[in-house]
Amino acid sequence: MALFPLTSNFEEDFVLQLLAVDTDHTMDQVAAAAAHHSVGRRVADRPGQVMRVRRQGSTDPFPRSMTVIESGLAPMECIEVVWEQPVLAAAGGAA
Amino acid sequence: MATLERLEWYDIARSTNWTPTYVTEDELFPPELSGAEGLPMTAWEAYDEPYKQTFPEYVKVQREKDAGAYSVKAALERSNMYANADPGWISVMKAHYGAIARGEYSASTAEARMARFGKAPGMRNMATLGMMDEIRHGQIQLFFPHELCPKDRQFDWAHKAFDTDEWGIIAARHLFDDMFTTRDAVGVALMLTFAFETGFTNMQFLGLAADAAQVGDWTFSSLISSIQTDESRHAQIGGPLVTVLVENGRKDEAQRLVDVGIWRAWRLFSVLTGPIMDYYTPLDHRKQSFKEFMQEWIVAQFERALLDLGLERPWYWDEFMHQIDTQHHGQHLGVWFWRPTVWWNPAAGVSPEERDWLEEKYPGWNATWGTCWDVITDNLLDGKVELTYPETLPVVCNMCQLPINTTPGPAWQVRDFPLEHEGRVYHFCSEPCRWVFEIEPSRYAGHLSLIDRFLAGMIQPMDLSGGLQYMGLAPGEIGDDAHAYAWVDKVRAARERRAS
């Protein structure tokens, strides 16, 4: 359990931001932390949709329950946080 | 006794090269300082520049310029210009003075390098005058804002800025140190005088002087005009050098340095000039959009100069054209959102009529940048001011040191351009900034960006207050909305009109 810096690239926001998370955080927690700095500040909320985390350039999000340490992300690596319809998110969560 | 006309003696008097006998030529002009590319002295002696000014002429003209600028200042000191000026315009002056005044000394150092180590006699002569120009620019741009310090503490940043680690100054210093103070004479001539001055500042100062006249700030207008006339002379040092290099088989070396210089200069202009022209200058006084200004005065003219001298368009030309349309919108949004971290008060520039202007000049603005401003505006209308402030730092580029950003909204294009070098991962805003690093990593690898410093624990406490303290921003100096959010009232009124 340790502080871990990432670079957050939130869908439809305009800028990369420093994101402090914990190595034990799940991807859902990472997405929520990223949203804190974007959603409701410069990005409109999308009630009912789920936020997913993926590596920059990847089309496949990490499983929602995967932790930062399990993901293999490097410090300050750029993650993309994208919206997903609930039905797709459920499928991804089971992966 | 009859006096010879200037042109009858100028070339002979300027030909100050000689054959050294007590030291070698390389001891007299060390290659690491001359950057002479191994060209023989005869090649350098072919260098010629169009101004051919003499020292007595220089002194006479400069005295007249100073007298003109200072007399306008003195005559208008009791005017109410400052009290009556739009706050957006006041911010233009604050941003300009802080970012530029002390940087002029870096430029003077660079001119001195050419004056001493340039192997072309004509370059040394012009650079001697250029060196004095830049000292004058530093002095005059410190003196003029000085009288405004008692009225507004942010003007103190005209002198203070370069002694701080404020993020914008880290960016400006990184560029000035790279292109002005740590290059050999050839590098300075190509990057400072050709890329930076011929390409950007000469025209930028013309535009800025015109804008100042438009808003009735005759003191600032005469100051900037006075500086611009110096720029238009000493900016000519680089062009003839390109000719010498191209004619002697050094085109690739010249192209590389020019390409680096143009890109680096552009990045700084995207944060300094773009927001000023499209957001800070009052709508009634805007003659051109930043994009129109860039296309007419910078791109078209400079592109022609490049091709005429035998160089090519930089390889990143398409990316450059794309960024002229987009990048300054993001820099502006970032500066406004992180407004406590700058020494001026950013004007939002997004009232309903200003947004109409932006949509007209940049079709699609409302569907992209406008989506971010919609959320900000709604928060201000709902009294949620705290959500219009940041709680973290933007990730900045390890080359230009500016926030990594691009188009938001449904057309979302933001991305990182990382590079691993000797075990450290660097983050860049674009391919060209990464390319600049890759062609000479040892020049840049040791520098720590603001984010690197934060992660290294150099900024304590690790929050906004620690950040402001690290950047030297004291209470009374930190930025806030230039118009005290009066533009939000215009939005409210417009929405009420639509609803009724």
Image (spheres, coloured by chain):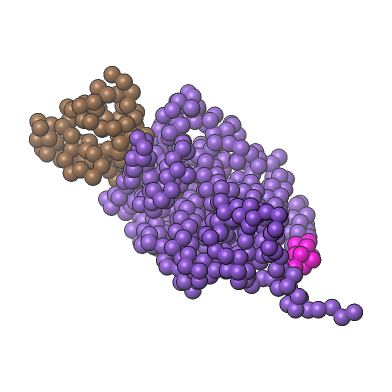
Chain colours: A brown, B purple
> How many numbered marks have been drawn onto this rendered protein structure?
0
In the rendered image, the residue lying farthest to the bottom is: B2
Q: B162 or B123, which is in the foreground?
A: B123
Compared with B308, A66 (above or below) is above
Q: Can you give x and y, in whole percent of width and height, for residue B378 in the image?
A: 37, 42
In the picture, measured across the screen, residue B168 lies left or right of residue B111, that is: left
Which quadrant is home to the C terminus of chain A?
top left
- Residue B493: percent from the left, percent from the top? 43, 49
What residue is shown at x 43% (from left), y 35% (from top)? B451
Figure quadrant of the N terminus of chain A? top left
Q: Residue furthest front?
A: B21
Residue appearing at x 71%, y 49% in the figure: B139
| Residue B17 in picture, x, y percent from top left | 68, 64
Q: Is residue A7 magenta?
A: no
Q: Residue at x 25, y 22 (%)?
A: A24
| Residue B217, x across and y down, in percent | 66, 57
Range of magenta residues? B53-63
* Observer able to see residue B457: yes
Determine the image quadrant of residue B384.
top left
Examine the structure image and report whether residue B56 is included in the region drawn in magenta: yes
Q: Is residue A26 visible?
A: no
| Near-viewer residue (A90 or A76) | A76
Please tell me whether residue B283 is drawn above or below residue B415 in the rendered image.
below
- Viewed as shown, does residue B460 lie left or right of B374? right
In the image, B199 versus B114, the foreground residue is B114
Q: Residue at x 28, y 52 (%)?
A: B411
Q: Residue furthest top?
A: A1
* Residue B363, picture quadrant: bottom left
State whether the magenta stretch is mostly helix, strand or loop: helix
